[in-house]
Image: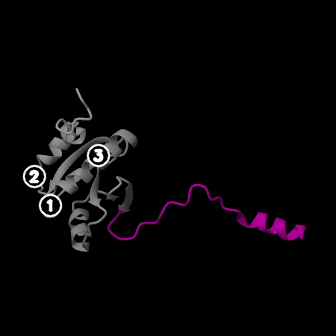
Amino acid sequence: MDEANPANPPPNWIQQHTVYQELMRLEVGDSVQVHAAFLVYMDLTEVRKWKDVVGVSCPELQAVLLEGREKEGESVQMIYPLPSHRSIKHRELRSILDRGSPMLLCAVASDSTLVYQRLCDGFLTPDPPVDIQDQGRRQHRKRRLQT
């Protein structure tokens, strides 16, 4: 087989992937968003090792959403893969949040960079930063005594 021959281009493995074909069968009518959903699916299942990830049609948004579990036995979360050049309206997010599942919005850049943002209904207290430790008052007093 001559790989340099433009008459025989290599097959697009993404379009041949079983999951991509399943996402296309959801018939949302937006191949760019389906492609974004596939990239997020691959990241969740292959890199982050999420469980039970499946695509679901969201007719009101003309989009493919993903549902999955971060770990075995945890509750199902909804993921909205959104190509980064697209905008989203508050009412569109509201329609997803009203489904009752925790939600992640995943912006998908043209270079396949993925940025996840957790969304919730109302305010959510953030987790404390992992690498910052509370210095406490004792250490502050220690410094003051040394000067």
Report if the CB atoms under discs 2 and 1 are less than 8 Å apart: no
Residue type indicated by callout 3: Tyr
Front-most of residues 1 and 130: 1
| Above or below: residue 121 compared with residue 50 | below
Query: Pointer 1: what residue?
Result: 62
Front-most of residues 39 and 73: 39
Report if the CB atoms under discs 1 and 3 are less than 8 Å apart: no
Tell me the SS state at disc 2. Answer: loop
Tell me the SS state at disc 1. Answer: loop
Quarter that holds the N terminus? top left
| Above or below: residue 104 compared with residue 72 | below
Tell me which residue sits at (46%, 66%) in the image: 125
Q: Is residue 124 magenta?
A: yes
Query: Pointer 3: what residue?
Result: 41
Query: Pointer 2: what residue?
Result: 27
Q: Is residue 32 toward the left or the right of residue 39 in the image? A: left
Residue type indicated by callout 2: Glu
Say the numbered circle drawn on residue 11. Answer: none
